[in-house]
Each structure stands twice: as C-alpha cells, then as structure tokens.
Image (spheres, rainbow, N blue to C red):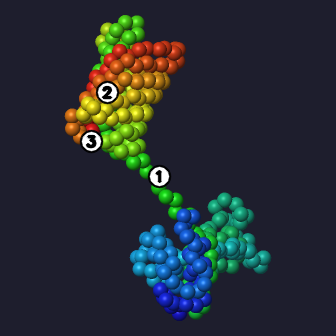
Amino acid sequence: MLRNLSRGDRGNDVLAVQKGLNLRKLPTEPRVDEIGVFGPATDAAVRRFQSRNGLVPDGIVGAKTRAMLFPLAVVTVQTFGFRLRLPSLLDPPSPRFRPNLFPGQLTLGSDPAPTPGLGPLTLPTLAPSFSYQPIPYPRLQFPIATPPLTPPTVPGFTIPVHHFELQPGTSVSFGRRVDVSFSLTVSGVVMIGPENGRHQEFASGIITSTPGVRDGGEWTVGWFAQLTHVEQLARFGNFTWQPNTQVVAGHGGAPFLSVTAAPANVQFDANNSLSISIGGPSVTATFAPEGASLSWGLASFGLVGKF
C-alpha cells in the first residue's frame, strides 16, 4: 500500500514525486531538487500542481494527487471471429436447396446449435469491445513516471477592456461641397497608461453613418479600430487633447475601407460617465471598388457615454 506523503517525509517515493513534479511543471515554475526529502520547495510545488489540476491544495500527495501526477492506463480490445457451419455430405439434398452464399442465406448472431444437413452460412454478432482500464500501483516503493495523457495547460488570453462607449455625433465635411452627416458608434476601449494622466487608448467596435444631408448617398455600417493619444490639458481643468487615427471596414452601396486622421480633437469630461467631444479639421482617404477618394472634415461634435 502506498503511503500518503507530506512535508518532512523522506525516501524513494518522495524522490519519485519530485521527479514527477519536475516533469509536469509549467515552464515558468522552478524545479524541485530531486533529493528524496519532502521540504518547503516540494510542498509549494505540490500545492501548485494540485491547484492547477482542480484538487484541494493541501500539500499532501494522496491517491488523487498521485493518480494525477503519474497517469498510467492501457486500452484492451476484445474481438469475435467468424463461425462457419459446413454442410454434411451424408444428408440427402433438400428440395429447396440453394448455394449457401446466395442472398437470403446469411444470418447474423445465430446462437442455436446447427441442425444436420445443408444450411446457410452462420456468423456470430460482430461486436468489437473497447474498454479503458486504469492500472493501480500495488506495493510499489516508488511510482512509475509516465508522460502526461493531457495537453499542458496554456494560459488564457484576455483583453483588458477598461470601459465601453456609446457615441452619437455629427460631422461637417467638404467634398464636392460642404455637407453634414450623423453617426453612432459602440465600442470597447482598452486603456494603456493611467486614466488621469497621459495615456493611449485603443477602441474597437461598430460604426454606422447616415448619408450627407445635401449630397445624399448610402447608409454605411462597418467595423472600426481607433488609436487615440490622450494628453491632459492641466491648465484647462477637465479638457484633454485627443489626436486619433481610425480605420473603418464597412459596406454601403459597396464595400469600402477608409482611413481617417484627426489631429485636433478636444474632449471635455463632464463626469465619469459623460463627455463632450469637439473635433477640428481631419482628412479621410476612402478605398472602394469604383476607386479611391480623399475628403476633408471641417468639424465634428459628439456626446460620449461611458459605461
């Protein structure tokens, strides 16, 4: 019978546990000295291993921890062959005799004993049986180290979204003539740096825009990504200077890709949930199947709701 191991134990079984921990540790975790003494470093490594595998991190190598640390299993396969009943040459031929391999003379899973005379080809039920059988470690002085049967743990990848924004706005642009349009964006914002100091923001979401009031056109909707530099204007209270670059991939009358540079945006934070955005001149390059175009933005105005 294998004993439970904990801090202070010594022996070959402790040495085996230390080897198993080093075999299954994460790349960022330290190695355990393989000296056969269950010390503080081994205790910490056991608790890390237990936490990572959904076990109680008590530092005791018992049956569950040992089975997880030294997985060893075999697969057994059982198959059944064919049983062929041959005709007797001494029996008189049957008036309804047909060769025994013709259609209609094949029987699956026939269990009764065969009767004398010519008869059909009889096969037992064909049922390969697969089973999974774990092997215990009876009376081993130290367990056998085996490769892990599960892939190593990969840390999850998360994007630290600081807040979400809903921003209705209007813009005045100059193409063939001065025109006005409206837009609505919904985005998630990732903040790089302190919120109340100089920092960068990456926003991504959905933007929809109306056609120009004077020139007309198509409604557009698309995905956008925007990179903004936020510079606190200390002399002007809650005002910040926010130059940004935005890329939009969307569809209106046809698919399009646009890139906008807006160096003169200023935002006033009324409180932690509501801001007012005022933009100056900007330039937009648009690429569509019918060709490329360049337009100028004269000014923009919007409300920014943060939640």
At horizontal 44% and vertical 23% (from top left) the residue drawn is: 260
Amino acid type, mark 2: Val
Q: Looking at the image, is mark 2 or mark 3 nearer the viewer? A: 2
- The amino acid beneath tag 1 is Phe
Choose the circle earlier in sequence order: 2 or 3.
Answer: 2
Numbered label attached to residue 266: 2
- For badge 3, the amino acid type reads Phe
* Residue under the point 29% across and 27% down: 277
Determine which residue is flagged by label 1.
157
**Measuring 68% from the left and 69% from the top, which residue is drawn there?**
121
Q: Residues within 10 Å of mark 3 (few under 14, many from 20)?
A: few
Image position, residue 157 (x, y; %): 47, 52
Per the image, the residue denoted by label 3 is 307
| First in residue order: circle 3 vs circle 1 | 1
Q: Is residue 97 left or right of residue 67?
A: right
Where's the C terminus, which quadrant? top left
